[in-house]
Amino acid sequence: DLVESGGGSVQAGGSLRLSCETSGYNNKGRCMGWFRQATGKRRDWVATITGDRQTDYADSVKGRFVISRDDAKNSLYLQMDSLSREDTASYFCAQSRQRWCEPHVNFYNYWGQGTQVTVSS
């Protein structure tokens, strides 16, 4: 299971830190990522991190979001700063069985239920 937390409502310019706790699967060394889905839109890639801590970000969040992981705690994080209304969405953590990462929904084998982030101006 993957369980996200840390979502909520924040004003534009604010920050949130999302967490994702994994259980039942050894994620050590595997690719993990964050995706988001706004109402009525497709699920989009946000950021990924390999077991070697190589990270990659969508252009829309680069420089504002930071993905990190703590395998000892079976946890994945997303620090989100300088939030804007365009960041409003449900955020999902995802886990792949592979060691490399790809920014495609179908690459990931396990998904959380999502946590809502709402940014108001």
Image (spheres, rainbow, N blue to C red):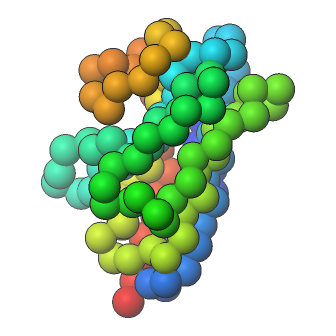
Q: Quadrant of residue 83?
A: bottom left
Indicate the position of residue 32 as horizontal and vertical percent values: 52, 28
Indicate the position of residue 25 as horizontal and vertical percent values: 65, 12
Q: Quadrant of residue 22?
A: top right
Q: Is residue 15 visible?
A: yes
Indicate the position of residue 67 as horizontal and vertical percent values: 57, 46
Q: Is residue 95 above or below residue 84?
A: above
Q: Is residue 83 above or below residue 98?
A: below
Q: Residue at x 59, y 67 (%)?
A: 16
- The count of marks equals 0
Residue lying furthest bottom in this view?
121
Q: Is residue 15 above or below residue 103?
A: below
Residue lying furthest right in this view?
72
Indicate the position of residue 56 as horizontal and vertical percent values: 44, 41
Q: Is residue 96 visible?
A: no
Quadrant where the image shows the N terminus? top right
